[in-house]
Image: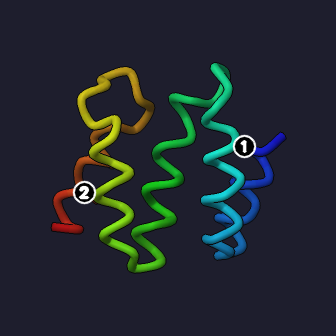
Amino acid sequence: SYYYAGYIAFRNADYDACITDLNRAAESDEFKLLAPHLITSAYYRKGDYESLITHANSFVQDKSVVERDDILILLADAY
């Protein structure tokens, strides 16, 4: 699945592939609440704070997103 491919890419520090795969995974109901955390973390590790801010702000109000508190910390640090 795209989620697991994205997770492996994240672990291998291939953040571009991670983001691509996890954005695809986020289109499914199964992973839409899991993928945002790793996508946000990948943007953070890349130093792409503008994309992190855009991405995180698109779902920051959704309290059902997994690891939301961690995402908010990364978002605050990106500003």
- Give above or below for 42 relative to 54: below
Which residue in the protein does label 2 denote?
Answer: 75
The structure residue drawn at horizontal position 15% and vertical position 67%, both measured from the top left corner, is: 79
**Local SS, label 2:** helix
Q: Position of residue 9 (x, y in %)?
A: 73, 65
Q: Which mark is residue 59?
A: none
Amino acid at the residue labelled 2: Leu
CA gap between label 2 and label 1 equals 22 Å
Task: Specify which label sits upstream in the sequence, 2 or 1.
Answer: 1
The amino acid beneath tag 1 is Tyr
Q: Is residue 45 above or below residue 6?
A: below
Left or right, 64 with respect to 9, comes to left
For disc 1, the marked residue is: 3
Residue lying at 66% horizontally and 61% vertically, measured from the top left? 18
Image point (38%, 21%), residue name? 64
Q: Considering only vertical position in the picture, is 77 above or below 1?
A: below
Q: Secondary structure at mark 1?
A: helix
Within 10 Å of disc 1 (Cα), the crowding (few <14, some 14-19, many 20+) is many
Residue pictured at 47% horizontal, 78% vertical: 46
* Structural crowding at the residue carrying mark 2, measured as other residues with C-alpha within 10 Å and reported as few (<14), some (14–19) or many (≥20): many
Task: Where is residue 65? Give x, y as percent.
Answer: 41, 29
Q: Is residue 1 left or right of residue 37?
A: right
- Specify the quadrant of the image occupied by residue 6: bottom right
